[in-house]
Amino acid sequence: MTEPDRSRRGFFVSLEGIDGSGKSTQARLLAERLRATGRAVVLTREPGGSPGAEEIRRLLLTGGADRWSPETEALLFTAARRDHWERTIAPALGRGAVVVSDRFADSTRVYQSVARGAPAELVDALHALVIGQEPDLTLVIDTEPAAALARGIARGTDEDRFETMGLPFQERLRTGFLALARRWPDRVRVVDGTRAPQEVADTVAGLVLAALEGR
């Protein structure tokens, strides 16, 4: 398993949430805030974040809802994540940078297992064997599923495969993300995403800066 040099290791933050929760905006605002403090920051995303993973992204986020089974999705997401880890995240952490990722392994736990029904044992085993790493801090941007889904659909991109699965799917996702905070209370924090974006950004930045200063 590829790991960054522990003597120089940076800090790894992931942002999670349902489709349309605003986490991508918050990831960008967080990266800007951290750069303003003089820190080296790598802003990245999943699926994607490296050339190979971006190719897999197109397979996962386009097409019909029934294009892949949840088990196949888990395999594809894990393959993309491995490439992302090897080529982007681990090298950045080894340089001492702060990595801000729009999604990481928690999304697979929630989307493919909780919401889509892939066995949790499969998802956890794939992660343990192929990735074996967790973020230092995960922030779940929590918002109301109907409003978030409307925003996601309004974006009008062709990467809307999960949005087409409907409101009940988004509600299951929210339940799954909130359960993460109960499962990993030391790593996962829930942030109220129903507020104005700048208010959310202030909360996000405060949590991350406190974690950085407390290391």
Image: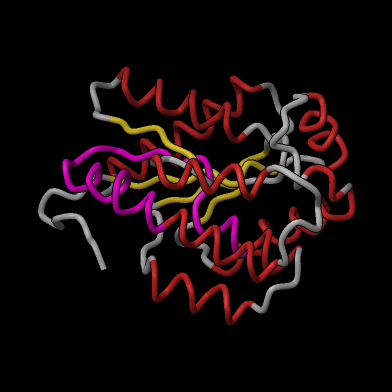
- Where residue 55 appears, x then y in whole percent? 50, 43
Q: Is residue 58 left or right of residue 176?
A: left
- Frontmost residue, 78 versus 63: 63
- Determine the residue positioned at 34% across, 40% down: 99
Image height of 206 relative to 117, above or below: above
Image height of 70 relative to 102, above or below: below
Residue situated furthest left in the rendering: 7
- Determine the residue positioned at 68% across, 21% down: 196
Q: Is residue 187 left or right of residue 190?
A: left
Image height of 122 relative to 107, above or below: below
Q: Is residue 213 left or right of residue 210?
A: left
Q: Colour mode? A: secondary structure
- Determine the residue positioned at 65% across, 45% down: 17
Say whether residue 64 is magenta.
no
Task: Point out the image quarter for the N terminus.
Answer: bottom left
Picture quarter containing residue 152?
top right
- Where residue 23 appears, x then y in whole percent? 60, 35
Q: Is residue 93 left or right of residue 52?
A: left
- Where residue 180 appears, x then y in whole percent? 60, 62
Q: Which residues are magenta?
A: 82-109
Say whether residue 95 is magenta.
yes
Q: Of helix, strand and loop, which mostly describes the magenta segment? A: helix
